[in-house]
Image (tube, grey):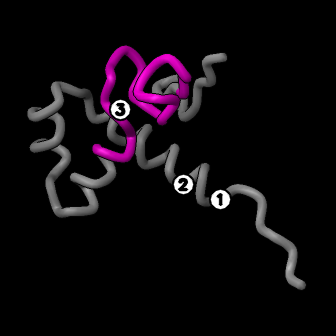
Amino acid sequence: MRTEHANNRIVVDPKVCHGKPTIRGTRTPVAVILGHLAGGDSFETVQKQYDLPAEDLRACIAFANEERSGPTPEAI
């Protein structure tokens, strides 16, 4: 089953990259893009290296935010 996220730009498909979130139409994992950005690479550098529009990079960040902002565990 395929799931789409972040404005339909991020997909999770068990048949692609072992079900890790990727940018739609590519095999580029979201984690790879986030790693480059967290490591200090500019949007422009990542865009050129992976041939992606800025909207895809923003979708990766939005996806990470959605995942991080999920349900908060209850305090014990």
Q: How many residues crowd mark 2 within 10 Å: few (<14), some (14–19), many (20+)?
A: few
Q: How many residues crowd mark 3 within 10 Å: few (<14), some (14–19), many (20+)?
A: many
The residue under the point 54% across, 28% down is 12
Q: Is residue 50 above or below residue 66?
A: above
| Nearer to us in this view, 19 or 24 | 19
Q: Which residue is mark 1?
A: 69
Marks 1 and 3, how far apart at CA:
20 Å
Asked if the magenta segment contains residue 19, the reply would be yes
Asked if the magenta segment contains residue 45, the reply would be no
Q: Which residues are magenta?
A: 12-32
| Nearer to us in this view, 45 or 27 | 27
Q: Is residue 75 left or right of residue 16?
A: right
Q: Could you tell me which secondary element the residue under label 1 belongs to?
A: loop
- Say whether marks 1 and 3 touch (CB < 8 Å): no
Q: What numbered label is drawn on residue 48? A: none
The residue under the point 52% across, 44% down is 63
Q: Which residue is mark 3?
A: 56
Q: Which residue is mark 2?
A: 65
The type of residue carrying mark 1 is Ser
Point out residue 1 in the picture as x, y percentages from the top left corner.
66, 16
